[in-house]
Amino acid sequence: MSVIKKFRIKSFKKQHAVISFQKVSITFGKRIVLDEINFNINQGEIFGMLGPNGVGKSTIFNLITGLIKPDSGKIIIENSDVTSLPISLRTTKFGIGYCPQYSGYFHNLSVLENLKAVGEILIKDEKDRKSKVDELIGDFELENTLDLKAKNLSGGQKKKLAISLSLIGNPKILLLDEPFAALDILSISNLQQIIVGLQTRSNITVIVCDHQARDLLSCVDIAIVLSNSKVITKGTPSEITSDELAKSSYFGQKFKIN
């Protein structure tokens, strides 16, 4: 699969850290999941996270949203220490949107009913709400699915709906948990274009984790690889796939992006 991104954002944008993990550690029972990890995510980046199952990628999402707290260390969002802030305050104050791996929509409602329902929660003004719903219908090409129940959509259509719902509140930071899982090649390509389009149009900071390494690396600016509770490398796709420790721990010696 060809690389969707034809540029790397760090080469021309002034870097401003939106999220910083500072010596963050967390254990579940006796298992160390994250061990004093440090990394920054910059404004407007598409940031990827890779690593084996159970390495802590979803845990990082839960730490960002505030669903769980670290045992030690700090989580900084927009220069504010949010380590102890609740989910609701993080979402409203810092504009965090989350698209989970599974679901993220009301199964028995139609596509249009889903959009209207979430819109009523997040957008008080009726005119603004209708405008946002219409915008998302167009951006995600949902016109032909509006009357279908969410549970009857294809895998790619479900992903589009879930991401569109996570964008209704105009988030500044969007978390995408395994967006490419179980999708066909064309759906993956369309979704990659959508992700890059979000950055281009809205300068949203997008954080993606997925086991589909090639698909993820085709659309991100920067990525990290996690292994044994640590961040073992961070850089552009070409940089991390050339890293010997990342090869031995995750990619293997024969892995190539294209």
Image (spheres, rainbow, N blue to C red):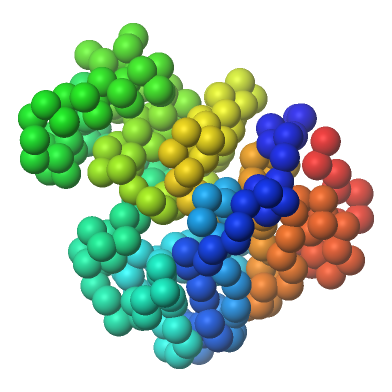
**Residue under the image location 18 percent in, 38 percent down:** 118
| The N terminus - image quarter | top right
Q: Tell me residue 227's x, y (percent).
A: 69, 71
Locate the C terminus and report the quarter of the image it occupies.
top right
Q: Is residue 143 visible?
A: yes
- Against 162, residue 174 (above or below) is below
Residue at the spot 23% in from the left edge and 59% down from the top edge: 92
Residue 175 locus on image (x, y percent): 44, 52
Placement of 62 over or under 203, stated as above or below? below
Q: Nearer the viewer, residue 109 or 72?
A: 72
Which residue lies at the image location 26% right of the left edge and 16% below the top edge? Answer: 146
Does residue 258 lie above or below 150 as drawn? below
Relative image position of residue 53 (x, y in whole percent): 60, 61
- Res 181 → quadrant: top right
Give the image quarter of residue 7. Answer: top right
Q: Is residue 121 left or right of residue 67?
A: left
Asked if residue 31 can be seen in this view, the reply is no
In the rendered image, residue 60, in percent from the top left (x then y), is placed at 48, 67
Q: Nearer the viewer, residue 16 or 165?
A: 16
**Is 41 positioned to the left or the right of 74 in the image?**
right
Q: How many marks?
A: 0
